[in-house]
Amino acid sequence: MESMTAVPRQVAGPRMRRKGRFQIRSRDRDGARVVYLDGEIDAATVSRFQKRMEQIVAAAGRLVVVNCRGLQFANTATFGLFYHFHDTIRRSGGYFALCELRPKIRDVLRILGLEKELHVFDDVPGALAAARRHLAEGA
């Protein structure tokens, strides 16, 4: 039985079957920090995700976009952390966005009511454009 608050694991070939495979990398793009997630955020990797995101958010300034294209699985703690980083950046006058979410991960955001709270976009350019508009408006 699938949990309503966790994204079910998908069989994605031998590379994805290793539990705890996760990578996070980031780069500056057009004045924002774009974070790329790849693999699974589960009990074995969530603390690494949290620590690395804390470093990125502290150093990034006001614009952070998280590209979730490579994110295969996210446990419930991941969704809480997405909200935490969104709230932290928002309170400092910045903008935090998620993009390229897999349908099942986006469904969980919707079920949890986070899709209305978080800024979710189809792609990085859309997220960056919205972030720039937000900052230009001073909202």
Image (cartoon, rainbow, N blue to C red):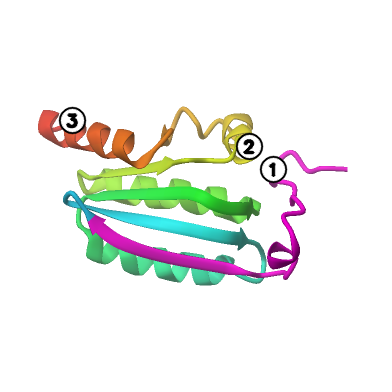
Q: Residues within 10 Å of mark 1 (few under 14, many from 20)?
A: some
User: Which residue corresponds to mark 2?
Assistant: 108
Q: Residue at left 46%, top 27%? A: 116
Name the amino acid, label 1.
Thr
The dominant secondary structure in magenta is loop
Q: Secondary structure at mark 3?
A: helix
The quarter of the rendered structure image containing the N terminus is top right
Which tag, 1 or 3, sits closer to the chain's start? 1
Cβ atoms under marks 1 and 2 closer than 8 Å: yes
Residue in the foreground of this view, choosing between 30 and 47? 30
Give the residues in magenta: 1-28
Q: Secondary structure at mark 2?
A: helix
Q: Tell me if 17 is positioned left or right of 123 in this view.
A: right
User: Which residue corresponds to mark 3?
Assistant: 133
107, above or below 11, in the image? above
Percent across and percent down for residue 40 are 62, 60
**Is residue 65 on the magenta stretch?**
no
Q: Residue at left 63%, top 53%? A: 72
User: Which residue corresponds to mark 1?
Assistant: 5
Give the spatial CA distance, label 3 vs label 2: 27 Å
Cβ atoms under marks 1 and 3 closer than 8 Å: no
Percent across and percent down for residue 14 are 75, 66
Percent across and percent down for residue 31 are 16, 51
